[in-house]
Image (cartoon, grey):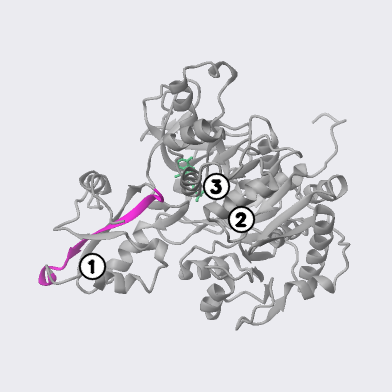
Amino acid sequence: MLKGLMMDYPLTTQHFIDRATTLFARKEIVTKVGPNTERLTYGEWGRRVNQLANALKRLGVGRGDRVGTLAWNNTRHLEAYLAVPSMGAVLHTLNLRLPLDQLAYIINHAEDKVIIVDGTAAPINCVTLLEKIKDKLTTVKHFIITSGAQTTLSPALAYEDLLKAESDNHAWPKLDENEAGALCYTSGTTGNPKGALYSHRALVLHSFMEAMSDGLGLAERDVVMPVVPMFHANAWGLAYTATMVGAKQVFPGPHLTGPDLLGLIQSEKVTVTAGVPTIWLGILAELDKNPGKYDISSLRAMPVGGAAAPRAMIEAYEKKYHVPILHAWGMTELTPVGTISQLKSYMQDLPEDKRFEYRSKQGTAVTGIELRGVDEEGNAVPWDGKTMGELEVRGPWVVKEYYKMEGSSDRFHNGWFRTGDVVTIDDEGFISITDRTKDLVKSGGEWISSIDLENAIMGHPKVLEAAVIALPHAKWQERPLALVVAKPDFKGQITKQEIYDLIGTKFNKLWLPDDIVFIDAVPKTSVGKFDKKVLRDQFKDFKLPE
Ligand code: AMP
């Protein structure tokens, strides 16, 4: 190799803290707390990030140790987001909407040593969730509660007391950019959730991409409100990118209703806010119901993804409220952004219909990511906008294997990651997701495992077979429908209620099928698997109850 090259300067999250605190110390981070807001500057926040790192170190958190967070979007969560990876430990964000047995599984699988728990009183209370599974947790040494909430978790420490006792100067260690910084689990089609372990390099390069104009164009002048949860796919990296560029950040906490979010957009002059379609459909309804009530003219872009953004929604926001939706596609395994639908310069003059057609697609690969569609033999399909193939991707922020998981090599193919999404790619490189090979239901942005539901229903002594399929839903995008076959002796002698009684104890409400239909037999493929394609077709016009 030639000599005389660049410095060996690692790409790490430490750089984000450094920029935010030295260049943008006066800029604000705002969190909604009940009817009020809690405000901190990056300068104050940075001192707390140092204190948190010192406190975690004192509790024995060392290089590579996993620190869990179970929390809504708020400033303290952002403290953990930066302190944990920057001290050389690994931030493991826990999804508070997971079924309890899966939550316990991922904490044990990741071997979380400490968990920082949001003490905010909210419809889903993080402290209560952990109390329910505490006896199953085998590795956690300390719970740090962010409020003074009473708890049976033990040993439990108060976040603010811990910080108060520490110096606001932490000696950040020299890190390698290929060290792990963060860990997120995603629901698997079968079996347990799978971990995507992000390197510092991936986190930083992903943020560079988001700051590019043809990425999300996030800049210092933006006011960024991530509505997408910080416990799901790292809030799409927005919290990191906003910190890196010194943008003001606004966090809604657990307050996710239309009036709450619209109120924040108006009062904080939010310019970029991102989330799943379900949230923006709700906001659209609130805006339509109250003409002139909210001023959202500050918004310049609304990245929407996690599920397909309906074209009617994209058109309505643009035409009625002058807010451009940026349709994006991503996955936990991609840190998570892979494509964004940005019109090319020569597309701006296309007829309106054509422009919306492109904007409703999931877009082109962002800088850094390569993609292709492959057929069943593994050959690339043409970019003709018609031929379907499974989407495969590769790039510096795509996982190359799942964390501590043998037997997942079928998801990787000659150096490409197989996404499980089925796409067409047009001659401009825009992908359209047309189907999914993954047997999962995505409701309001969160996964529901059909197979877990089926197994639970088939645990009923009167049930022979059960198949769960996703049906389209106006608000939630998809909702589960259970199709159940009774054992011959119990035909006509089993009620829906008996099944709900059984599964209602195992899953939270979000997971329960919207309806249960008894059928004579589940159609099977040639190899005897449930043929969901046939079922989806049979029930495509089925009306779920309101
Ligand atoms: P997750 O890892 O939970 O973020 O889920 C990733 C999956 O969500 C993808 O593989 C897709 O199936 C789905 N998804 C994400 N974004 C979109 C989108 N814009 N349109 C359709 N499906 C999407």
Give the spatial CA distance, label 2 vs label 3: 11 Å
Which quadrant of the rendered structure holds the C terminus?
Answer: bottom left
Residue drawn where x is 52% and y is 32% of the image: 318
Q: Residue 421 is drawn in which quadrant?
A: top left
- Please tell me how crowded label 3 is: few (under 14), some (14-19), or many (20+) other residues with Cα within 10 Å: many
Distance CA(mark 2)–CA(mark 1): 36 Å
With 383 as the anchor, is 158 left or right in this view?
A: right
Q: Which mark is residue 230?
A: 2
Seen in the image, is 14 located left or right of residue 293?
right
Tell me, yes or no, whether the highlighted magenta stretch contains residue 478.
yes
Q: CA distance from mark 3 to mark 1?
A: 34 Å
- The answer to which of marks 3 and 1 sits earlier in the sequence is 3
Q: Which residues are magenta?
A: 475-490
Q: Is residue 89 visible?
A: no
Q: Where is mark 1, residue-wise?
A: 496
Give whichever of discs 2 and 3 has the lower sequence position: 2
Instruction: Name the residue beneath numbered marker 3.
Output: 275
Counting residues from the start of the chain, the first of labels 2 and 1 encountered is 2
Q: Name the image quarter holding residue 165.
A: bottom right
Of residue 157 and residue 227, the one placed in the foreground of this image is 227
Amino acid type of the residue that numbered disc 3 sits on in the rendered structure: Gly
Q: Main secondary structure of the magenta part?
A: strand
